Amino acid sequence: MTGPIRIDVSRDVLEWAVDKSEKRALEEQLPMLNRWLDGEIKPTLRQLEDLAKKTHVPLGVLFLADLPKEELPIPNYRTFGDDIIAEPSRNLLDTVQMMVARQTWLREYLSEDGFAPKSFVGVSRASDDPKVVADNIRNTLHLPTDWAESVGTWEDALIRLCRSAEEAGIMVVRNGVVGNSTRRKLDPTEFRGFVLVDKHAPLIFINGADYKAAQMFTLAHELAHLWLGTSAVFDLAFLQPADHAIERACNEIAAEFLVPAEILDRELPQQLDAADHAIVWQDMARRFKVSPLVIARRVLDMNLINRHEYQTYYDSYLDGLRKRELRERADGRGDFYRNQNYRVGRLFFTYVDNAVKENNLLYREAYRLTGLSGDTYAEYAARQMGGV
């Protein structure tokens, strides 16, 4: 009696698929994995199907002779140290593709229903005065200059900014995992967020696994991208200078949006003379709901401190941040339906559910677009009707 037919799979392709996932978890789930990688034994078709499912790689890709080349469909400004991260993870690729599908559907839906394009998308240029662009963003979102001071916590400020963006017609998704898969956590060291520019359906994605203060800067940065009309994946590591002109402009606009220079000009000089600078950064950070590094960077750019002082504080803050990382970072848990306000977004779900009720969208398509199905979709829809 012959045994199962085994498949001759390229070792490079196998290693590529494994590199897209957590190898330690795969080794526990697939006991023969290391023997396949070492060439001791070939996998069966059923084992390849299992590998494809667990690595979220299409089965057909595993039969290729050469490594597949996967690229993001938008500009990639992610960095790690001094190097550009050239190849995105499967989690990032799947997340971007999911958001592109949502945007494509919503663009068609809004266009067919005669909705006007958003006038603020692409209205500015990278050469414009950051203050002028930041003021335009605040005015469009109906936020006063001191809006962050009126809310109590970073989370409250983030929620308010997200909702203001949605009210302006911007889809905002904030998620720390792929869809609703809590096993597929998004890595903030790979990317902090991305923006998909579109006149009808602009979309901002924020990595919800990142620190709350970092999420604030990411959201402001991506808003700047919308005003400049440029899509991008973003990872600004601790406010180090960006190498691209668009990124530098977005950083400056985001900083001005979150921490207006006129307030710093008016209040900081006296405080810097009278108190420890690190304490000043912390106090200002709590006031504006941003990272203390944002404050320190703003003060450096205004020539109120020198680069040596900024670098010393940066190194100290980074060291402390690493020690607090596990305690402070979001873990993706919480109320499932409340999480959908961020993972799906109230604005997007409203359009999808309206299309279903108008018989313009099948339920199976609504399930695919939202990641919700059956009873969970119905329950979330009911909660939205109830204002939850």
Image (cartoon, helix red, strand yellow):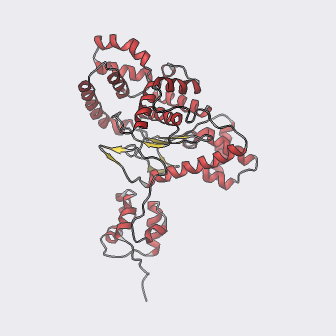
| Left or right relative to 69: residue 356 | right
Q: Residue at x 34, y 26 (%)?
A: 297
Residue 370 visible: no
Q: Residue at x 63, y 52 (%)?
A: 367
The image shows residue 371, relative to residue 282, as above or below, that is below
- Pick out the residue farthest to the front: 127
The image shows residue 260, relative to residue 169, as above or below, that is above
Residue 25, how many percent across, how many down? Answer: 38, 58
Name the quadrant of the N terminus.
bottom left
Asked whether 337 or 13 is in front, the reply is 13
Asked whether 158 or 247 is in front, the reply is 247
The image shows residue 288, relative to residue 208, as above or below, that is above
Name the quadrant of the C terminus.
top right
Residue 322, how many percent across, how many down? Answer: 30, 37
Q: Residue at x 43, y 69 (%)?
A: 62
Q: Quadrant of residue 269?
A: top left
Residue 106, how many percent across, how many down? Answer: 64, 45
- Pick out the residue farthest to the right: 358
Q: Quadrant of residue 214?
A: top left
Residue 176, how many percent across, how many down? Answer: 46, 44
Q: Residue at x 59, y 24 (%)?
A: 142
Asked whether 312 or 124 is in front, the reply is 124
| Left or right relative to 153: residue 122 | right
Tally the numbered discs.
0
| Left or right relative to 127: residue 41 | left
Residue 296 visible: yes
The image shows residue 186, relative to residue 1, as above or below, that is above
